[in-house]
């Protein structure tokens, strides 16, 4: 089926309890229709683990109510997962494809506003719009032709994201890259130009440059809790969190992305 920007196809499992959303023939989202907190894509599991470490969903006072901004929505898998573990959170998903956003509302049981609002528009415009810092979590998972749009990876864009985070907030950015990870390293350098603390999350084989895969970059004003690394190591497919001097080694010699000069 055609959308505003591409085509969308749904591939259900035999019991129709799980569905994969394909955009332009490429897997974009996977939803467990019975258990929204169950995320299949490993990079989403990595994001989920970091959020769990930063804002534990179970504790003496119960789960905190998060404010989350999703830059790129697709099937809203992460928004559903956050709603499941942090009930009554307030989330905004920005999706450039208007018809896709409409279909997701029609096809799936997504949280309703104000718990989840979906805004059609460009993610950069949403971040650049005036407003106070108010999000505990900002997630960037936006692609065009399998590549992150250039205007969503620059120092200027990242500064705007940082300005929208609370003091204990975290920025999570999904990068797909090939060995030796030149794009991920430049994006990490970009985050390091803005945030006091930068983390790199990926499977060890990807970090060692042995294969193509997803790298999750984390930017924050404060250090991540130690539990983040432990949670990632304990996953079915173990992931590694690189911070501190090792993170600086990862990005060493790579220039941050910047907006082009004004004409």
Image (tube, grey):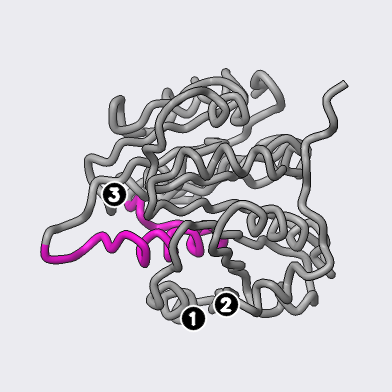
Q: Indicate which label's residue lies in the foreground, 1 or 3.
A: 1
Query: Whole-Å distance between the Cαs marked 3 and 2?
Result: 25 Å
Question: Is 7 left or right of 80, judged from the image as shown?
Answer: right
> Which residue is drawn at the image coordinates 57% and 40% (left, top)?
21
Q: Residues within 10 Å of mark 3 (few under 14, many from 20)?
A: some
Q: Is residue 17 above or below residue 207?
A: above
Q: Which residue is mark 2?
A: 240
**Going by the image, does 77 lie left or right of 153?**
left
User: On the image, which quarter does residue 141 sit in?
Assistant: top right
Residue 166 versus residue 46 in the image, above or below: above
Q: State which mark lies toward you, 3 or 2.
A: 2
Q: Residue at 78% x, 36% y: name it.
A: 259
Nearest the viewer among 261 and 215 is 261
Magenta span: 35-60
Query: Which residue is identified by label 3?
Result: 84
Any magenta on residue 28?
Answer: no
Nearest to the observer: residue 49 or residue 248:
248
Mark 1 in CB contact with mark 2 (< 8 angstroms): yes
Badge 1 element: helix
The residues tagged by marks 1 and 3 sit, at their Cα atoms, a distance apart of 23 Å
Distance between the alpha carbons at the discs numbered 1 and 2 = 6 Å
Of the residues under marks 3 and 2, which one precedes in the sequence? Answer: 3
- Secondary structure beneath dot 2 equals strand
Q: Position of residue 136 (x, y in %)?
A: 38, 47
Q: Quadrant of the C terminus?
A: top right
Earlier in the chain: of badge 1 and badge 3, it is: 3
Residue 233 is tagged as 1
Residue 67, percent across and down? 34, 41
In this view, 167 is above or below 231: above
> Which of the numbered marks, if any, corresponds to residue 117?
none
49 in magenta: yes
SS for dot 3? helix
């Amino acid at each position: 089926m055609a959308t505003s920007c591409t085509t969308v196809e749904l591939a259900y499992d035999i019991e129709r309890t799980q569905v994969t959303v394909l955009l332009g023939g490429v897997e974009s989202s996977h939803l467990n229709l019975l258990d929204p907190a169950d995320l299949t894509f490993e990079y989403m599991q990595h994001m989920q683990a970091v959020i769990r470490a930063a804002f534990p969903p179970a504790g003496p006072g119960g789960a905190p109510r998060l404010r989350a901004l999703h830059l790129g929505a697709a099937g809203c898998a992460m928004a559903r997962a956050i709603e499941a573990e942090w009930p009554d959170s307030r989330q905004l998903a920005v999706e450039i494809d208007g018809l896709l956003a409409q279909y997701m509302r029609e096809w799936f049981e997504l949280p309703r506003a104000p718990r989840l609002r979906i805004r059609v528009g460009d993610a950069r415009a949403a971040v650049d719009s005036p407003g106070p810092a108010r999000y505990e979590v900002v997630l960037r998972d936006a692609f065009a032709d399998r590549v992150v749009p250039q205007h969503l990876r620059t120092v200027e864009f990242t500064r705007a994201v940082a300005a929208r985070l609370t003091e204990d907030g975290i920025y999570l950015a999904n990068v797909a890259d090939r060995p030796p990870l030149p794009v991920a390293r430049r994006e990490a350098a970009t985050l390091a130009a803005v945030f006091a603390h930068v983390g790199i999350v990926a499977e060890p084989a990807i970090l060692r440059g042995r294969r193509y895969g997803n790298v999750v970059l984390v930017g924050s004003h404060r250090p991540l809790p130690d539990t983040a690394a432990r949670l990632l190591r304990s996953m079915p497919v173990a992931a590694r969190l690189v911070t501190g001097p090792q993170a600086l080694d990862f990005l060493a010699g790579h220039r941050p992305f910047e907006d082009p000069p004004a004409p």
